[in-house]
Image (spheres, grey):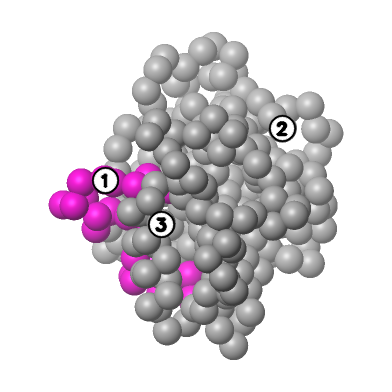
Amino acid sequence: MSRKHHIPRQNSANYERSFFGRRQGRSTSPLRIGILDDLLPKIELPEEKLLLEQNISPEELFGRPYSKYWLEIGFGYGEHMATLLRNNPDTGYLGAEPFIGGMSAFLMNLQEDEAHDNVRALMDDGMIIARSIKPNSLDGIYVLNPDPWHKKRHHKRRIINQVNLDVFADILKPGAPLVLTTDVENLAEWMCTQASNHPAFKWTANSKDDFYTPPKDWITTRYEEKGAKGAKKMVYMFFERKE
């Protein structure tokens, strides 16, 4: 890898990272390395602004103001976010994906587009963005199919926990959605319990069927279509930041 900022930075501001694990599994092809070198700098979030101090307005991270701002943490291959930013050109999207394979796939999805003005990305832990954004400034957050950390001793590493929910509650506007998905049964129970027990969020489901039913305009990803090993059903959880 030729660019130094492909190497994720270390802890800062007494923040214990919520991401653990390998960022590169298989060898990265020359094509993907090339697109990382070419396109990522055009949309990359500047690390010097991400100080984990909740002092950055989303407007400062884009070339122009947008009507809304959303954050997607761990966007995988990026099909969901790529479709969103094309369908909603007046919304600014912030995205984080720590894996080289995922980020390069997302960039390959974008390479034919003429402009990428409404997306800014970080190849690192998404909580770095969340802990840098000003309170009451986001119109929504997606956390789709996060790492389940199956072993009980690793449950503290799950991204949906009371500490991170405190951060989400701070940066979301009143009434803004927090959208969570997983196809891991015990993780779904964990995520739903954690978010339901948080005083700043309310679950918008009306019945058990809502647990397994995506909205009509839902963007289905390759992960959902293929299904992870041992997966049963995809679970969709929609929470709302209380007024």
Name the residue nearer the viewer: 130 or 146.
146
- Please name the residue shown 62% across and 65% down the image: 140
Q: Secondary structure at mark 1?
A: loop
- Please name the residue shown 39% across and 31% down the image: 229
Q: Which residue is mark 1?
A: 150
List x then y, in percent, for residue 221. Answer: 62, 38
Mark 1 / mark 3, whichever is N-terminal = 1
Quadrant of the image occupied by residue 204:
bottom right
Q: Main secondary structure of the magenta part?
A: helix
Name the residue nearer the viewer: 10 or 192.
192
Quadrant of the image occupied by residue 186:
bottom left
Return the residue found at the far left.
Answer: 153
Q: Secondary structure at mark 2?
A: helix
Task: Say whether residue 165 is magenta.
Answer: yes
Question: Which segment is the magenta one?
Answer: 146-170
| 211 vs 154: above or below | below
Mark 3 packing: few (<14 Cα in 10 Å), some, or many (20+)?
A: many
The quadrant of the picture occupied by the C terminus is bottom right
- Please name the residue shown 47% across and 82% down the image: 200
Residue type marked 1:
His
Task: Say whether residue 137 is magenta.
Answer: no
Mark 1 packing: few (<14 Cα in 10 Å), some, or many (20+)?
A: few
Q: Which residue is mark 3?
A: 188
